[in-house]
Image (tube, rainbow, N blue to C red):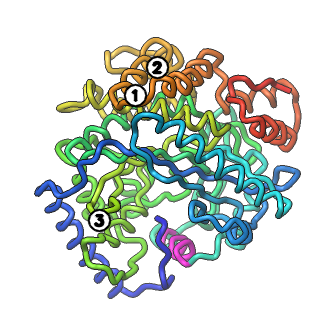
Amino acid sequence: MGQEISSTHFSQADFDAFYAHLESETKSFSQQIAQGLCSHKLPVAGFEIEAWLVDDEMNPVALNQTFLQAFNNPLATTELAQFNIELNNQPVELKDKALSKLHAELDTTWASASQTANTLNAKLLMIGTLPTLRQSDLTLANMSPLKRYQALNEQILHLRGEPLKLAITGKESLSITHDDVMLEAATTSFQIHLQCPLELAHHYYNAAVIASAPMVGISANAPYLFAKELWCETRIPLFEQAIEVGGYDGAAHGPMRRVSFGTQYARRSIMEFFQINLEHFPILLPMQFEQPTTHMEHLRLHNGTIWRWNRPLVGFDDDGTTHVRIEHRVMPAGPTIIDSIANAAFFYGLAEELCDTAVQPLPELAFSQAKDNFYQSARYGLDAQITWLDGQKHRVQDLIASDLIDMAYRGLEKLGVDSGDASTYLEIIKQRNLTGQTGSQWQRQYRHQTGNELNTMVMAYYQHQQTGYPVHTWELS
């Protein structure tokens, strides 16, 4: 949902006009798919990484507008809260040294962004949820001054008709209410993009769904929120409840949530999800665009206000050809750049192998089971018990060791990824899994062992992050 809008107040005529455009663009996109006019390029890789601006005490500092002006880099953009930013990359074909290229680019961008933050007496931090964050930080005064955020807040609260309620039970329990959508700003993620050939897009989507449980388990990095120890990846229930609005059948309590794991696999085409968007989700931001329907601005904006954990996206190649990407949203930011690229390598390899062996013509694992696996892994991390393709229960850590790393190797080989690259990054996954030390586990163990305050723990985390060494090598000191 990157487009800015020109107004925050909308009439019924605005909603009616937007729906007409949305309906037309959905039909146009369906026709493009039916006629095979979308991109058939080999897989292309990309990402978005969200980060925190913090002060010397590791508390959030609201200065992203000043930062972005000083950084002046088209790869950086704003986020909902003024203490968050987002960094992007230039997409690369998923072959040869693609992983090294992603790593080198993020290294360069991050180093430059960190330097800019330092000139503003701030630090740049990548972590799933910031343990030092207080609920009092999440005020509208700290919202980024963009109209789309103001309008989003107004529309969600209008649809709900009551404050947002957050209730999470993990190691401890948290139950609060909040008067605006700023709770969403407490989550920062590493979002992987996979552009894939049109005819395989629905299979890649289903593969991403199945892969979600082990991916969130191995990458977990968000155990603390408002000083409470909750899930291994608390970001998942937090984000779902921060925008608790459903579909037409009962608004906030409808059968389809705007933030969710979804309700089904893709059966025959990725188009199914855009039809669901049209039929089941009220319009939140009825902005009008000048472009013809071939640019599908209304379809893309509406899709951007529906936050599936695996979300199909529409974009365009350099020559203007429409393409489809799968956005894998389950992973948190951090702990380090090399950990992030290792996570990407694991996902790309696993998705490719699952797409090739486990989801055609239909997935071997029931969707309801894939969904349950995902939430179990988000809560319990590598200790979660999930049901896999063989119909048997496995501990996530054991499954990754016995099957999934080998599957990822095979997938990367099929993609034509350099074998040295594959070994470099998947070895990090192997060692993290072997030690059991994810970002989430390191945070918990550090605090339990030292008894230090959260600010001290986050400072130690930041110092380790600055070394660039992967999290499985971090000491608890």
The disc at residue 412 is 1
Q: Residue at x 31, y 53 (%)?
A: 324
Between 390 and 29, the residue placed more toward the observer is 29
Instruction: Please tell me whether residue 376 belongs to the stretch shown in magenta.
Output: no
Tell me the tag on residue 389: none
**Residues packed near mark 3 inside 10 Å, few (<14), some (14 to 19) or many (20 plus):** few
Label 2 crowd (10 A; few <14 / some 14-19 / many >=20): many
Q: Amino acid at mark 2?
A: Ile
Range of magenta residues: 147-156
Q: Position of residue 150 (x, y in %)?
A: 57, 75
Q: Residue at x 24, y 78 (%)?
A: 20
Q: Earlier in the sequence, mark 1 or mark 3?
A: 3
Secondary structure under the numbered disc 2 in the rendered image: helix
On the image, the x and y values in percent for residue 177 come to 64, 58
In terms of secondary structure, what is the magenta stretch mainly? helix
Side (left or right) of 121 relative to 368: right
Q: Amino acid at mark 3?
A: Gly
Q: Say what amino acid the circle numbered 1 marks.
A: Leu
| x and y, in percent, of residue 181 in the image | 58, 64
Residue 309 visible in this rendered orientation of the protein = no
Q: Indicate which label's residue lies in the foreground, 2 or 1.
A: 1
Kindly report which numbered mark, 3 or 2, lies closer to the viewer in this rendering. 3
